[in-house]
Image (cartoon, rainbow, N blue to C red):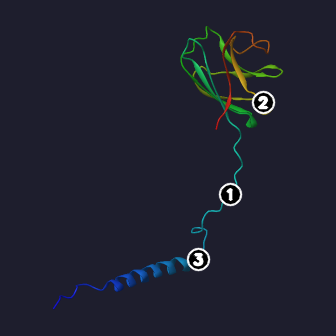
Amino acid sequence: MGSKPSGPPAWRILAGLATAVAVVVAVLLSQPKTPENLPAAVTPTTPAAALYVALLKMPDSDMQWTLSLTPARALMTVAANGTPQLGGRAAELWWLSPNGPIAIGMLPTAGNGSLPLPAALASAAELKLVISLEPPGGSPTGQPTGPIVASAVAVHAA
């Protein structure tokens, strides 16, 4: 005579598991649909405004400016890093537009800042930027009067 296996038969275990799953599904299906347990609706988003970046570095120096330009919003942020060696002059940023240089503004020599961008820059095909050394407060003529110490073409950030 063989010994009888101990414990419930396998079919009873499977039946118990199936019953438990059925109860869980029934409870989930019977819950009222409230905003708290509904999936979030897909909300269309507006595309982000184009962002361009440029790094302008002074030669033979550790001074550099990192620029983030959003022409559609007419705004630029700038981060200055390094030791400014400007010889009593100020760093002025220019956009080389098809019609000639257009002043964007005076760049900080430390920390971060922001500057408004010319409206015409929003439709520009190329964003070529230069820095000239000007008297404190900027160019007295509205055009670069001092030497160009850095230049770069802003590239579209992916």
Q: Is residue 38 above or below residue 84?
A: below
Q: Is residue 104 above or below residue 133?
A: below
- Of the residues shown, which amino acid type is indicated by label 2? Ala
- At mark 2, the secondary structure is loop
Q: Which residue is more in the foreground, 47 or 83?
A: 47
Q: Which residue is more in the foreground, 46 or 108?
A: 46
Q: Which residue is mark 3?
A: 32
Q: Residue at x 57, y 15 (%)?
A: 84
Q: Which residue is more in the foreground, 113 or 152?
A: 152
- Of the residues shown, which amino acid type is indicated by label 1? Thr
Residue 13: where, in percent of width, then height? 35, 82
Q: CA distance from mark 2 to mark 1?
A: 32 Å
- At mark 1, the secondary structure is loop
Dot 2 crowding, Cα within 10 Å, few <14, some 14–19, many 20+: few
Residue 133 found in image quarter: top right
Picture disc at residue 43: 1
Q: Residue at x 62, y 62 (%)?
A: 40
Q: Nearer the viewer, mark 1 or mark 3?
A: 1
Q: Which residue is mark 2?
A: 125
Q: CA distance from mark 1 to mark 3?
A: 23 Å
In the picture, measured across the screen, residue 4 lies left or right of residue 11, that is left
